[in-house]
Image (cartoon, rainbow, N blue to C red):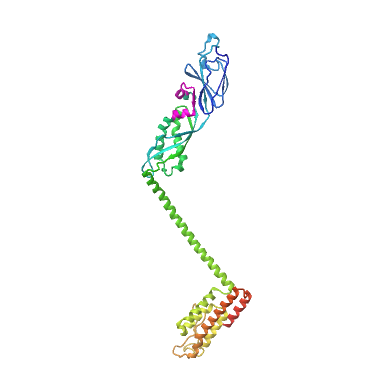
Amino acid sequence: MAEILQIIKYEGDNSTFVWKSPIEDFNTGSQLIVHESQEALFFMNGQALDLFGSGRHVLETQNIPLVRKFLNKPTGDQTPFHCEVYFINKTEQMSIKWGTDSQVQYMEPMYKFPLKIGASGEMSLRVEDSRKLLVKIVGTESWLGQAALVQMFRSFLMARIKPYLAQTMQNSEFGIFEVDSHMGELSSVLHKQLIPDFMDYGISLERFFVTTIVKPDGDKAYEKFRDIHIRQYSDIAEAQLRQKVGIIDQQTSAQRMVIESQGIATKRSQEGYTYQQERGFDVAGDVARNEGIGNFTNTGIGLGMMGGMAGGMGAVVAGITTDALSPVAPQQGTSGNNISPPIAGIGIIPPVIDLKTEVPPASSAPLQSSVPDDMSAFKKKLEKLKMMKETDMLSDQEFEAEKAKLLENL
């Protein structure tokens, strides 16, 4: 004879979706304990009747109205009745793996070639409608675990996921070569498509993730288009890199020129002469080597270009010019002055020479010999002074003093 009062509670684990209590045919007054994450469903004579939520329930006729009409009234509601209790775990069951059993063929949207791929990932499920799950899937089974549910849904998943995956990939704005960076978008689209299918069985598809796309490595068409895809981006990147390197080279060259110019300017400042004076030294050397140095016109122009040199040197050149041309008579038609107006761009006023007047040979000889000799000696002595300064034989003050003497002796 059955016990008068019994305690019915869940004794399964957390990976179980449905668990049937082994206690059956209990009397009214028995206690039912349901946890917060569970529901308990009464079956009587094969029919799903009352559904209990979390808490402690005393199973009396007033608490089970659907069962009450089946009780034996003449026995004072104490007659045992045949019933079954199923506990449904409503927690979210995570990390349930899924994967396609074969590859799916579709038309690649970017390059328009047929392609076969596979996919796999994870999902999480939760029981939404306990009655629907028990009626449609569990039936008379006493237990339904995670592995058993996935096995039952395997063919269902393949029938749904494969066409959804092919349609999503074919209609997407990204191709097979960019799919790895769009896994979240692909997972979201498939999740929305699968939710109604699971809900038909009382299961809520809480989360759905695509973690791997199996690509047809080794397929000739796939390898060909993959090379084309990589090439179009690598060529652009290479061209951009060459352009950046060219710009860097130009900037480096310009900076080098600036540094060299600053170094030369610092050197001139330390040695006590300017760029115009340095150019004057070079012009003097060119004049001395010029075959037309005997021509007084060329001499005047050459000496004019030397006007940027030191003041003492300008005075010497002016003296040489005056002495060399002193025998020449004033030009007819002038106002008594034998000097012509200044020539633009020339630092010295060249003399006006009467080409009809014969110039004594003696007056030109000193000009031809004194200018190059003086300049050559000046440059040699200056170089010696620089060398003595660089070897610390002369101090900066001594070097400046000796250089001033050289300029005075020009």
Q: Residue 117: tell me if it is visible.
A: yes
Q: Main secondary structure of the magenta part?
A: helix
Q: In the image, residue 183 lies at what x, y percent? A: 46, 40
Is 230 rendered above or below residue 277? above
Q: Residue 301: tell me if it is visible.
A: no
The range drawn in magenta is 134-153
Is 386 rendered above or below residue 149? below
Residue at 45 percent of width and 32 percent of height: 195
Q: In the image, residue 322 lies at what x, y percent? A: 53, 86
Relative placement, left or right, of 195 versus 380 is left
The verdict on residue 393 being magenta is no
Residue at 45 percent of width and 57 percent of height: 243
Residue at 57 percent of width and 77 percent of height: 384
The residue closer to the viewer here, 317 or 257, is: 257
Looking at the image, the residue that sits furthest to the front is 218
Is 58 rendered above or below residue 107? above
The verdict on residue 151 being magenta is yes
Relative placement, left or right, of 218 versus 24 is left
The residue closer to the viewer here, 18 or 388, is: 388
Q: In the image, residue 327 lies at what x, y percent? A: 50, 90
Quadrant showing the C terminus: bottom right
Is 365 rendered above or below residue 164? below
